[in-house]
Image (spheres, coloured by chain):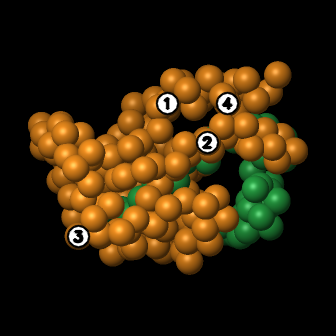
Amino acid sequence: MTSALDELRLVDAESETEVRAGELWQQRPVALVFLRHYG
Amino acid sequence: MHCREHALQLQRDRDRFEASDGELAVIGMGTPAMARDFRRELEMDARVLVSEDRSAYRAMDLERASTAGVFAPAALPASLGRTARLLRRGTMPQRIPQQDWHQLGGAFVIAPGGELVWEHRSRHPADLPDHDALLAALDNATR
């Protein structure tokens, strides 16, 4: 499952820099919390 | 209003996440500007990352509910309670969503190296992850 996510590119909302998803859990465990819409 | 309640819950538990052995990353849809507006309105400290095309949602196999699923009866009690809480707080309970309102959320804990060790996929909009369980999984993921 996570291998599909590893190479996904996300964008930091504040800096607008691109983040490779796999970097998030390279060193430490990560909780990924997926929101619904912002309505 | 569930997305707003969810953001407020994350903010309320921010100290618990900071004290954990892991990190918190909130994933949203839409544009970075939309995510920034939402983050500021709800005074969220957590880092928000955007998957504008929802590819991250698809990669984690998160459900895109039908219209009937979005308005599921199971969500009604929580909807009423959360609307009341948000109004008491002075927070607008709902705005017209500019993103895909059929998309459901979820939460995952991924251990170093990429092993998925905990998951919660929302069955309807009101079905938010239990933070006690999520934080326990985050702490256990380092051991």
Q: Residue B6: image x %, image y %?
A: 38, 44
Q: Name which residue lies at 40% across and 65% down.
A: B65
Q: Name which residue lies at 56% across and 77% down.
A: B53
Earlier in the chain: of badge 1 and badge 4, it is: 1
Q: Name which residue lies at 67% across and 65% down.
A: B59
What's the colour of chain A in the image?
green
Earlier in the chain: of badge 2 and badge 1, it is: 2
User: Which of these two is toward me, B23 or B61?
Assistant: B61
How far apart are labels 3 and 2 at the CA level? Answer: 29 Å
The amino acid type found where label 2 is placed reads Glu
What is the quadrant of residue B12 in the picture? top left
Asked if the residue at tag 2 contacts the one at tag 3, i.e. Cβ–Cβ closer than 8 Å, the answer is no
The answer to whether dots 3 and 1 both sit on one chain is yes
Q: Secondary structure at mark 3?
A: loop
The 10 Å Cα crowd at callout 4, few under 14, some 14 to 19, many 20 or more, is many
**Which residue, given by chain and number where applicable, does mark 3 sit on?**
B96
The 10 Å Cα crowd at callout 2, few under 14, some 14 to 19, many 20 or more, is some
Return the mark for residue B138.
4
The answer to whether dots 3 and 4 both sit on one chain is yes
User: Which of these two is toward me, B45 or B140?
Assistant: B140
B61 relative position to B100: left or right: right
